[in-house]
Image (cartoon, coloured by chain):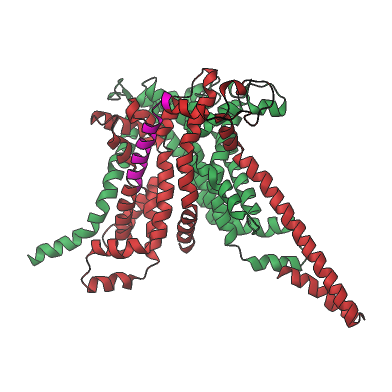
Chain colours: A red, B green
Amino acid sequence: MQNTATIKNPAVKLSRSGYNAKELEALHRRMGLAALRRRRIKKGILIGLNLVMALFILFPLLYAVSVSLMPGNELFTMEMNLLPKNPDFSNYLRAWTQVPLLRFILNSFLVAGSITFGQIITCSLAAFAFSFLNFRGKNLLFMLVMATMMVPGEATIISNYLTVSRFGLLDTYIVLILPSLTSAMGIFLFRQFYMSFPMSLYESAKLDGCSNLRFIVSILLPLTKSAIGAMSVYTFINAWNMYMWPLLVTGSEEMRTVQIGISMLDNTDAQSITLMMAGVVSVIVPSMIIFIVGQKQLIRGMFSGAVKG
Amino acid sequence: MKQLAEKLRGVSPYVYLIPCFAIFGMFLFYPFIKTIYMSFFLTDRLGQPKIFVGGENYADLLTSSSFRNSILVTLIFVLIVVFGSMLLGLVTAVLCSRTFPGIRAFSTSYALPMAIASSGAAMIFKVILNPTIGLFNKITGLDINWISDPKYALVCVALLTAWLNSGINFLYFSAGLGNIDESIYERASVDGANSVQKFFRLTLPGLSPIMFYTLVVNIIQAFQSFGQVKILTQGGPGESTNLIVYSIYRDAFFNYKFGSAAAQSVILFLIIMALTLVMFKVEKKGVKY
């Protein structure tokens, strides 16, 4: 659009100032080529800038991968050593045997998976009530939910720690999962989506004798797949990356989640740096895969809801 | 029978709220109130409130140079993190606002930091900033012990956090840019506006709705950074990176001063709440769109 506009305008002006048709056509073509070249150069610059930026953003990750493939002695030179000269996987082998990395990863999958699943259930039930049902105190309760977003986790973490230790729940899966089983953001996101459905959808389902629960399971959930997808990716990654809570409530090695587990590789012993990077990369890869696979869902779900609201 | 059914129908909406409010109640409302309560007490090593001291915990904190340092350090940290991560998010989003071949790979890279844990990132930066073998010193030719020097440690942790938080900002700003009507750019081009003018006159104002939301989220998030401090600096050297959150952690779980830690949590909450409210006020008054 933009380009044709700029090409046409001078052409019109010039034809008034006495060009014949042939000259005009030649000029037209020349301008067209020039515009095309300009556009190509612009695109080239854009791609160039993007390459530089992407390299900058990804640099820490790429470097971590590179170090994780270096044999221990290669890292310890004063020379520039961006890439391993003799890359091998021995660091990974050692990292996976030195600490029970597989166990940590399974723990984290279990914990993050349960949290994600639980949040979808509790949040969709609450969002259903907030958007389709009428009851006293509805607005107040919803405000209360929203207000929880402002409370930093640290303001409650000490009391929570004392509570769960009194219940003897320390060092269990339950204590890792339970406090995160609901979230204000999830309720908000689902509610945004549910509000976009007409009330008549609910009313006609009711008339057909559909119970509330069946309405949620067989109508609402299938219709809000994209919101659920977005929520799942976001929640899973956040749960996978949890640090402070697992650090406090897990004591034994078998209960450690990945983020705490890899800190065990973080040793002052300099020889273990390559080992540590192998551990870090092993732990980043799962969350990265989930992010890359779910990215489209995440963006569509998060922002189509937000825009409607 | 009929009455009972009627009553049940009146109750039923609340049934759907039970799961979420049970969790909120147990792990958010209750502990929040208990934290406030505890902040008025001296506690024993198990965290049981023992002696009521009124506002003494608060008074002690506000007069302690260590805590005032924590607040100052936290504010500087938040400033750097928020500015850095929003700038990174904005630049990357603008770079991806027009389509070009390979745009999907690039936008995935820009959003990727949001998938990375603070602990993992901190361990990577520990290697990059290492004084002898670290790449940063090798590239710049400097010989600085970045994380053991009180002058640089805070900035390093803040920049690492800015990088971590930039991913989600990229997504926010991309969504914001997508909402700007393309035709205003065309009209501006016809009127002879250059790219710089277009950016400051059209793009930035067009982003202001999402900009505000992003700012609030970023500030709240920055205040809560913990893992990177724990792994990189442990609050040191000196107390140069002793952010409030880290100070809470240290007082509660190393010094067993649960009462003081609770008071710090309350102050942290008050700071965040005040900032959020002020921003909402400013937004209502100032930003027009």
Magenta span includes A103: yes
Drawn side of residue A284 relative to residue A121, left or right: right
> Residue placed farthest to the top in the image?
A269
Above/below status of B260 relative to B222: above
Q: Nearer the viewer, residue B96 or A160?
A: B96
Drawn side of residue B49 relative to residue A20, left or right: left
Q: State whether residue B149 appears in this view.
A: no
Position in image of residue B3 (x %, y %): 10, 65
Drawn side of residue A4 relative to residue A14, left or right: left
Q: How many marks?
A: 0
Image quarter where the C terminus of chain A lies is: bottom left
- Could you say which quadrant of the image residue B11 lies in? bottom left
| Stretch of the chain drawn in magenta | A97-116
Q: Which residue is found at the position 50% from the left and 22% from the top?
A: B66
Position in image of residue A282 (x %, y %): 47, 35
Magenta span includes B154: no
Drawn side of residue B120 relative to residue B188, left or right: left
Position in image of residue B190 (x %, y %): 75, 69
- Could you say which quadrant of the image residue B139 lies in? top right
Image quarter where the N terminus of chain A lies is: bottom right
Position in image of residue B8 (x %, y %): 15, 60
Q: Nearer the viewer, residue B105 or A257?
A: B105
Question: Magenta span: helix, strand or loop, mainly?
Answer: helix
> Residue placed farthest to the right in the image?
A18
- Could you say which quadrant of the image residue B151 lies in? top right
Q: Nearer the viewer, residue A287 or B148?
A: A287
